Amino acid sequence: MSLTLQVLNGHRYGESITLEATTSIGRLADISFDDVKMSKVHVIFELDRLLGWFVKDQGSKNGLVVNGERTSSHLLEESDLVEVGATQLRVASVSAFWKPQLNQVLIDAFDSVRNEPLTMYAFRLIPLLRFVQGVQTGQEFVLEYGPRKVGGETDDILLYEPLCPDLAFEISANNQGIWFKTKYPKIVSINNKQSVRKLLKKGDRIKIHNTIIEVDFLNI
């Protein structure tokens, strides 16, 4: 449950900083730096006991940059480069205790849905949902049967995007192919368009706030 940061430059160059709980960094913060480009409280490092460690900008003047990209919030992984003002911090180690927990949540959700045979059918064309942006980046879901439900409070595929609808969208099939359907087109867009229903194609992108899911299909 700890996070270790290595200071790569500045007056604290070479130091290792280990965090155990939510900690602010800035010129006048829990951990202070002599960096004129930092705000008084520039960022916080915050532990989410399910997802892991986040770094979050606190409305700073010069912003937060992680791995060369400006962001307001980022789920940290080992070797990430965090730039706060002119100071560079490398994530030397980050507890991975949350990953087995998250995996178990997904396994339990899968088992729950799998045990409903009366409402399930096999997909002839098997879609793959790949998370390419957001807190679940890198996760993939192969959908061998349907219909499937995706959202923040579903027993099927869970989304950890803040403010995500309980049921963000559904994936189903008919003789035309695989379909996307949502009741929240203003929140859940596809290819940057507000669509209630769309026949899915390879490369389609579903966006819910900061989460982007790319659609692919398996060759079988």
Image (spheres, grey):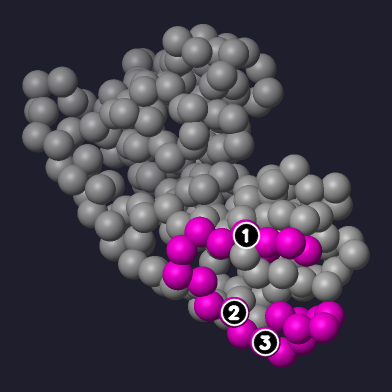
Q: Position of residue 21 (x, y in %)?
A: 46, 63
Query: For this rendering, which residue is in front, 108 or 30?
Result: 30
Query: For this rendering, which residue is in front, 93 or 116?
Result: 93
Q: Residue at x 21, y 26 (%)?
A: 121
Q: Amino acid at mark 3?
A: Glu
Q: State whether residue 81 appears in this view.
A: no
Which of pointers 1 and 3 lies earlier in the amino acid sequence? 3
Disc marking residue 17: 2
Q: Residue at x 67, y 87 (%)?
A: 15
For disc 1, the neighbor class at 10 Å (few under 14, some 14 to 19, many from 20) is many
Q: Position of residue 89 (x, y in %)?
A: 70, 73
Q: State whether residue 159 appears in this view.
A: yes
Q: Given contact means CB atoms under 8 Å apart, are the residues at marks 2 and 3 in contact?
A: yes
Q: Residue at x 77, y 56 (%)?
A: 40
Disc marking residue 15: 3
Q: Is residue 168 above or below residue 93?
A: above
Q: Given contact means CB atoms under 8 Å apart, are the residues at marks 1 and 3 in contact?
A: no
Mark 1 lies on a secondary structure that is strand
Disc marking residue 48: none
Mark 3 lies on a secondary structure that is loop
Question: Which of the 4 image quadrants contains residue 151?
Answer: top left
Question: Which of the 4 image quadrants contains residue 194?
Answer: top right
Callout in the foreground (1, 3): 1
Q: Which residues are the magenta region?
A: 7-29
Task: State whether the magenta stretch is mostly helix, strand or loop.
Answer: loop
Q: Position of residue 82 (x, y in %)?
A: 71, 66
Q: Residue at x 36, y 16 (%)?
A: 175
Which of pointers 1 and 2 lies earlier in the amino acid sequence? 2
Q: Does 87 lie within the magenta span?
A: no
Q: Does 12 lie within the magenta span?
A: yes
Query: For this rendering, which residue is in front, 213 or 210?
Result: 210
- Read off the residue under disc 1: 24
